[in-house]
Amino acid sequence: MSAADLTRTTAADLAHRLSTGEVSSVEVTQAHLDRIAAVDGDVHAFLHVSENALETARQVDADRAAGVALPELAGVPIAIKDVLCTIDMPSTSGSKILEGWIPPYDATVVARLRAARMVPLGKTNMDEFAMGSSTEHSAYGPTKNPWDLERIPGGSGGGSAAAVAAFEAPVALGSDTGGSIRQPGAVTGTVGVKPTYGGVSRYGAIALASSLDQVGPVSRTVLDAALVHDVIGGHDPRDATSIPDQWPSMAEAARRGLTGDVLKGIRVGVVKELEGEGFQSGVKQRYHETLDLLAAAGAEIVEVSCPHFEYAVAAYYLILPAEASSNLAKFDSVRFGMRANVTGTVEDVMAATREAGFGPEVKRRIILGTYALSAGYYDAYYGSAQKVRTLIQQDFDAAFEKADILVSPSAPTTAFKFGEKLEDPLAMYLNDVTTIPANLAGVPGMGLPMGLAPEDGLPTGLQLMAPARHDARLYEAGAAIEQLLEGNWGHSLWSQAPELGANGLATALGSNGGAR
Amino acid sequence: MSEITPERVAHLAMLARIALTDDEIEKLTGELGAIVDSVAKVQEVATPEVAATSHPIPLTGGMRPDVPGQTLTTEQALAGAPDHDGSRFRVTAILGEEQ
């Protein structure tokens, strides 16, 4: 098969072809490196492309030829969000303050990818320290949305989502603190999962807000996300918040969803508070069409009310800055990262370094968090936000009495244009109104493509949420819903992504602009 | 209205060890004022009888067995440092002259 075909298929299909010897990992890896070379000048999904990818692939091919038993995804390339520590590649978290920093260890999830013999392709762009919804806060310039290069790819994980949407990688890793996997998924027509808090190790993930951060998979199909989740998930003694439970196979759950009749009788809870004002008409239209399809497939659609979700964004923008201001204290110009070339005491050097090394959004949130935690304000702000967290958990508990999964749009709008919300932090924060509740409560959430909005031809996303520890339920239902939607469209959403030309212009494939 | 003043922002910046410029302080004062007014909404429902949640999934324990683990070597720990002498991080003076 041609090199282009190797980039336009799924990780599951590549794994199968690799296992039969139809293709080699070197061929698959080279095809993706060629694609990166061809389009990443325009997309800018990658901050660093690995020099070791082909050698890693060669070793997998050699072991396969020698008859070594290999894991399912052996030889399949993967992109890694720059928030994750990699011992052989710079890890900057999108910040100037970590420019060129090569960590002395791998994040646990990266170590697990390597143990699964996957091939790291490189590091993907992100908003600085994962603070943002557009990648416009990256110190290294924004990533472009492959569906329209003048629009944002979502954030903070816009690089991972764009890499997968632009066929530069079959799968990627992201991190999700308030929607940084699911919102980019929505606006780039890709799949992304935020696992149950504690389901995937945070060791070696450069911390933003430790009680909210989760690492998860980014892909073009639900099954591919499940395969990656199985590789990275499970208990890690190096993360004190890692859940010690045994987990079922997410890939098995996804395969059950693809082959079984799992939607019949499933109770789908429609969260009343996550639609309406602020939601784009085409997003609402695709959402209601999807609910109709689910009902026709035998699902029981029930309305649920989560009255405290309207306080979620406010609580989030207290808890996150508070935790971030503490986590980012480690950038002290002493142990790693940049040091400003000024004279004075160590504190003078530290303050000058942080002034020069942090971008405006990071400074904004550190100052806000310092305020929320300061004496005299702690109870009014941080303490109150933690109480809202309890109320949101109670909302989820009540909703899951009535429903097996909850649904909402993954993002209120399709991709917006660069600069549109950059000068209005509060407007930017509202991008995550649908995704933040799951982080506050610790429950798992999945975003998957829901069709193109009629008014602008851009992707919309459906979010599924399940009770904590029930990630497998998302994969089972998600795979079935993906199949239902693709059956209705007659194709996958990603097959309709525009071609990216050498001239840097995205041109639409086909005359109907994709899924309708 | 919030109590975010330029003086307060300057004080918070000192606490956070960020040498903000005067222009940044002025811009942040307006932005943070608007953000704080907005997030203060949490106080509407955070009544005394509601318990606070600090951690989404309650876990107990989390202690590992008390045996030596795999740790970084001195060389690895210093590898990313802006300045060091081979065994220690090197910094400028800890105390200013007036201290």
Image (tube, rainbow, N blue to C red):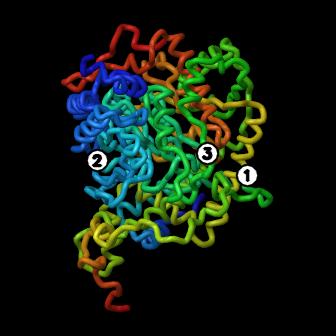
List x then y, in percent, for residue A384. Answer: 67, 58
Q: Residues within 10 Å of mark 3 (few under 14, many from 20)?
A: few
Q: Marks 3/2: CA distance?
A: 40 Å
Q: CA distance from mark 2 to mark 1?
A: 40 Å
For the question of whether residue A6 can be seen, the reply is yes
Q: Is residue A486 above or below residue A243?
A: above
Q: Which mark is residue A260?
A: none
Please state if A403 lies on the left or on the right of A258 as rendered. right
Front label number (3 vs 2): 3
Residue B45 is tagged as 1
**Circle 2 is placed at which residue position?**
A140
Q: Chain of mark 3?
A: A
Q: Which residue is disc 3 drawn over?
A: A246
Going by the numbered disc 2, the residue's amino acid type is Tyr
Identify the residue at image location x=29%, y=70%: B78
Q: Tell me where residue A95 appears, x and y as whole percent.
A: 33, 54
Pointer 1 local density, CA inside 10 Å: few below 14, some 14–19, many at least 20 = some
Q: Residue A159: image x %, image y %?
A: 36, 39
Return the x and y of residue A92 as percentages of the image width and height. Answer: 33, 53
Mark 3 in CB contact with mark 1 (< 8 angstroms):
no
Frontmost of labels 2 and 1 is 2
Quarter holding the N terminus of chain A is top left
Farthest residue, direction bottom: B98
Count numbered badges in the picture: 3
Residue B38 visible in the picture: no
Q: Residue furthest right?
A: B49
Residue A502 lies left or right of residue A70; in this view the side is: left
Q: As displayed, is residue A80 above or below residue A221? A: below
Q: Check disc 1 and give the amino acid type.
A: Val
Q: Return the chain for callout 2.
A: A
